[in-house]
Image: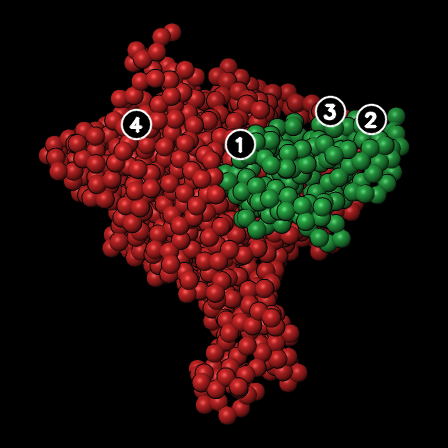
Amino acid sequence: MERRIRFRLNGEWVEVTVKPNELLLNVLREKFGLTGPKYACGIGECGACTVLVDGEPVLACLTLAVDVDGRDVVTIEGLARDGELHPLQKAFLEHGAIQCGYCIPGFIMVAKRLLEENPYPSEEEIREYIRGNICRCTGYVNIVKAIKAAAESLRAGSSSHT
Amino acid sequence: MSKIILPKRLEKYRYIGKNTIRHDGIAKVTGKLKYAYDIYLPGMLYGRILKSPYPHARVKKIDTSEAEKMGAVVVTFKDVPRKKFNIRLVSVDEVNYKDWEVLTDHPKFVGEYIAAVAAETEELAQKALEAIKIEWEVYEPLLDPLESMTPGKPKIHDKILFGQREVEVKNNIACTKEYVEGDPDRAFKEADIVIERVFKTNRRYHMQLEPKVAVVRPEPDGGVTIWTTTQTIHNTKILVSQVFDIPMSKVNVIKLPIGGSFGSSIQTNLVVLVAVALALKARRPVRIALTREEDILDHHSYQMIFKVRVAAKKDGTIIAGELENIMDIGAHQIQAYPLLGTALGWFVSLYKWKNIRYKGIAVYTNKTPSCAFRGYGNPQVTWAVETVIDELAEKLGIDPLELRLKNYVGRGDIFWGQGPTVKSVIRSDGVPELIRKGAELIGWDKRPKPGSQKGRYRRGIGVARGFHTSGAGGPLSGEVIDYTGAIIKVNEDGTIDYITALQDHGGGTLDAHAKIIAEELGVPLKSINIVWADTRTTLYDVCTHASRGVYVGGEAARRAARIVKQKLLEYAARILGDIATPEGLRIEPDEELGQGVIYVEGSPEKRITVGEVARIAWQRNWGSIAAAVSYRSYAAPPAFTVYFVEVEVDTETGIVRPVRVVAGADIGTVVNPDLAAGQIHGGFAQGWGMATLEDLPYDPETGELMNRGFITDYKVVTAPDMPKLDDFIVIFADTEEPTGPLGAKGIGEAAKNPVAAAVANAIYNAIGVRFYELPITPEKILKALKEKGEIKE
């Protein structure tokens, strides 16, 4: 019943044999050593396991590994390019948005998609977009601040390129 | 953007009071940081634990043969040392109640551990677990503490240990504490006004993001290496050694970052002991990672039922206070006994009651064992007392702020940092400043009259104040262990290694230590490397709890830095030559060089870098420049907090939302402003959850949690529930704590303690109804409004 699947993982094509009921989260963590996506609830309630599949935020704890066959998967480990942090990662660092940090990979992955969909999110739109992610440390204040700041720096970055 | 108001005094420091990038920040934002849950060892087995499905039962027969046939390694209560222990080792042994075993044939709550298996995969382990056959004898559960303590009810425990002495448990009362000061009976007779109220707090779950996990590797010398979620690596080491009779030198516990804890790993989580038992039997590394549904059965907060009685004179002078505290502690004691004393301590340290009576009773029930949860009983006590104080002010016609200022325990008074055996004198106090500034910013004078509003949406402003201790030190040794250790060594290039067992839960505690070291030594912050350590390479630290991390650990680090500085200056004097005394030397950080530079005061051309001193000391065989300090504080100062909260009640849905928050905190010197503010933000969020959302009801028939472990039905605060950024103001008081490192005190728990009270007082201000049972849910609000006749069915 095992199946060989092939998908793009953080920019590189990989192959792995999985069982039909194997979860993407476990495959990423145990077969590829990518422990950035976290287990925290296992039932899609907290967002800590969020990864991007074809650019869309997906809960890896509810996704079967076979479902990503042929697709593009990005985890938090794949966000920084050539040692250069993504503006969201920088903003989280600069705005004290991280405490224990366990939920942070999930927040950053969700926020990445938010800022692609909506480069000018209002504070309310940010809060709504991240409502599926639980943080028990920060009260979300500095997280929202960081996402706002990242939006600004992304806008400034893209305008300077065009 | 959310505002943070900082005292000007901080400008004199280089690193203290400045926002910096946390040392573990890059590893955290890139997903590279390894938490205990991320540890997988080569050749390891996966463990699963068989838990009792019944709240109270006995195992008549257990058959593990099928599981063993599947190739699983199995341990049951027959295979582990049958000793009773307490999984928390913070109290001294003589006052430590011990009623727990690694695995048991007599489970006392749904979720208690009976047996465990380890296998090549988690799936196989689960299948093996399901193949274990058990014949049960099932008993009726006791879920209500008041019922449980009624004479004649079934016994949850029979004989337990108190220190090394066996004691019999009567009427399911785990322990008690009573205290009287002055003549409360006379004071209540002489009072102009007496208020008496009964309060019931909620049972809450820490919901730390990282579930508990243990990875244990057996070593060839008969010892074990342990990776786990813990607030104390040393107490974990000691407990494992005591339970399994392994010499402490052969138990090594690795310090790892922890994905939140909030008190839930002050004790060694039992999963560690189970994993040790499996690993020793299997002779292979074993990993047991709790699922969320298992984690929620592992630890809850203490649910408390209070009777509060307060007596005052017409002019607002409080003359007596009484507190009766019945605590539902669940099925085992973790820190019920010390908490009976600590809850009293919070009570006596809030206001000058003058005449005091206290009765505390901790009661066993067939529920998940309770443990500390950010505030250690303080949010509960403060909610009750601050509600009564608000009522008292209204009845007396005195401004609630004035009444508080008139009666609060402040500078010069005695503070009970951790119950009756941990007392010290208050030396820093920002309460008046915080009340004044907070009132101005929230618009206290413009708040509505309680219950005066009509219409669907009603707003109200509430205030509450409180505090938390900074550690559990004091001049007397007392019943609480509280000391820590710091090692600092200068590398041969001048970079500095800082080694401590003290855990950083994410609040930035160790970044604060690094700043304190940099400030004290006069070297760049970036030259200090915080070492992730283990029990073998560190000095004892009791635990990161009681908001002691910065206050106690920071002072240990500062003292070690001071010794290192002296050595550096002595060596520099030798090298520079012609120096009369090293006391005339100064160190300044050079950010470009990434080093401290030592120079002669008044003759700056005579200079040398710290790195050059360290290199020469190495090359000339002078020895290491290092210091090791074990430190206990002689005080446990209160960090004061004052919360002003504005809420809006939707009288159609009963939903309350926070509109504005002005949070004042007196934490002495603010070391990490953004992260200290983060403690306030997070403390507010948890306090809001306590006030309005969180509860863990049990099914009276089955004795199971009603949510069956699913967090879908345990609501915590999410991003849209919080006030807007612009509407959350944090004020730090302009104070300096003489006993703290460069004037600092704690913050973690003070940040949360008065929140529920402030919210409850704001709800009263909005709709004119007081609630005496938490959480204040929409259902309760609608019911109350109906009873008041304000809304129709």
Q: Tell me the CA gap for discs 1 and 4.
A: 27 Å
- Quick one: B201 or B119, which is closer to the camera? B201
Q: Hey, what amino acid is under mark 2?
A: Pro
Q: Is residue B282 visible?
A: no
Q: Tell me the CA gap for discs 2 and 4.
A: 57 Å
Query: Are the residues under badges 2 and 4 in a single subunit?
Result: no
Q: Tell me the CA gap for discs 1 and 2.
A: 40 Å
Residue at the spot of label 4: B765
Image point (48%, 17%), residue name: B700
- Quick one: B639 or B532, which is closer to the camera? B639
Query: Are the residues under badges 3 and 4 in a single subunit?
Result: yes
Task: Bin the neighbour count of mark 2 within 10 Å (Cα to Cα): few under 14, some 14-19, many 20 and up.
Answer: few
Query: Are the residues under badges 1 and 4 in a single subunit?
Result: no
> Tag 1, which chain?
A
Give the chain coloured green. Answer: A
Task: Bin the neighbour count of mark 4 within 10 Å (Cα to Cα): few under 14, some 14-19, many 20 and up.
Answer: many
The numbered mark at residue A124 is 1
The numbered mark at residue A20 is 2
Image point (48%, 58%), residue name: B18
Looking at the image, is mark 1 or mark 2 earlier in the sequence? 2
Task: Bin the neighbour count of mark 3 within 10 Å (Cα to Cα): few under 14, some 14-19, many 20 and up.
Answer: some
Q: Are marks 1 and 3 in contact (CB under 8 Å)?
A: no
Q: Tell me the CA gap for discs 3 and 2.
A: 23 Å
Q: Are marks 1 and 4 in contact (CB under 8 Å)?
A: no
Q: Does residue B314 lie above or below B24 as drawn?
A: above
Left or right, residue A107 beside residue B64: left
The numbered mark at residue B339 is none
Q: Tell me the CA gap for discs 3 and 4.
A: 58 Å
Q: Position of residue A96 (x, y in %)?
A: 54, 48
Residue at the spot of label 3: B131
